[in-house]
């Protein structure tokens, strides 16, 4: 009987340890377009919309809706983080300075923008490995299909869902999620 209790306790503790060792959004760091370190842990308690962006894409006008969304909900514990990526038909050819100028001048972007990364392939950024793999995020597989794919991160740093590139940032799924509507 003691052996059975010991085995059961070991299994229970191992399961708890494994579930606690899983990463969250807050375990990642990035670098801003200006070269400053950015710790995702600084966003604890906020809903975060993570978007891979590009300056020369058919979806590039979504920058306007992203900025609109950011301004509307920024004071309600919501933030958007843009990650420029050149993974799709070289639609983000610029360097970080050129990307900042484009976003600011063309769309008035004020939400945080990170340095250009890779969102797929062998050189995929670790954050995107987490976002796109159920094995890593514990929620879903969601490989990046194109520029402007949106990932919703809840206030606890867990992946809450994904919105495809063609859906606008102001779609019902995102608005309802921000406003806690079913």
Image (spheres, grey):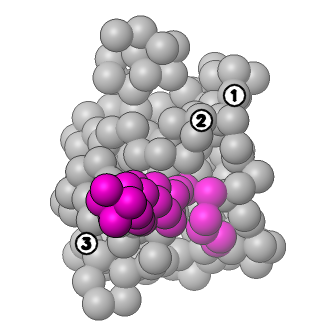
x 51%, y 58%: residue: 20
Which residue in the structure is indicated by mark 3? Answer: 88
Does the magenta run of residues contain 2? yes
Q: Nearer the viewer, mark 1 or mark 3?
A: 1
Which residue in the structure is indicated by mark 2? Answer: 155
Q: Distance from label 2 to label 3 (Cα)?
A: 30 Å
Q: Is residue 109 above or below residue 94?
A: above
Q: Is residue 178 above or below residue 145?
A: above
In the displayed structure, does residue 175 sit left or right of residue 79?
A: left
Q: Position of residue 25 (x, y in %)?
A: 54, 56
Chain-order first, disc 1 or disc 3 = 1
Please, what secondary structure does the residue beneath circle 3 have?
Answer: loop
Nearest the viewer among 51 and 99 is 51
Nearest the viewer among 40 and 7 is 7
Q: Quadrant of residue 53?
A: bottom left
Quarter of the image with the C terminus in it = top left
Characterize the magenta stretch by its predominant secondary structure: helix
User: Pointers 2 and 1 in contact (CB under 8 A)?
Assistant: yes
Chain-order first, disc 2 or disc 3 = 3
Q: Position of residue 43 (x, y in %)?
A: 70, 46
Residue range in magenta is 1-30
Task: Name the mark on residue 77.
Answer: 1
């Amino acid at each position: 009987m003691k052996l059975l209790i010991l085995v059961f306790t070991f299994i229970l503790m191992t399961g708890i340890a494994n579930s606690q060792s899983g990463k969250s959004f807050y375990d990642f760091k990035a670098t801003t377009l200006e070269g400053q370190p950015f710790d995702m842990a600084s966003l604890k308690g906020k809903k975060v919309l993570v978007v891979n962006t590009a300056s020369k894409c058919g979806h590039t006008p979504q920058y306007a809706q992203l900025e609109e969304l950011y301004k509307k909900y920024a004071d309600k514990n919501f933030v958007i983080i843009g990650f420029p990526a050149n993974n799709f038909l070289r639609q983000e050819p610029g360097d970080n300075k050129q990307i900042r100028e484009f976003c600011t001048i063309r769309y008035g972007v004020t939400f945080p923008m990170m340095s250009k990364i890779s969102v797929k392939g062998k050189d995929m950024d670790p954050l995107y490995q987490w976002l796109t793999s159920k094995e890593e995020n514990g929620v879903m597989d969601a490989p990046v299909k194109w520029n402007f794919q949106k990932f919703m991160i809840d206030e606890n740093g867990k992946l809450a869902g994904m919105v495809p590139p063609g859906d606008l940032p102001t779609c019902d799924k995102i608005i309802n999620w921000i406003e806690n509507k079913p």
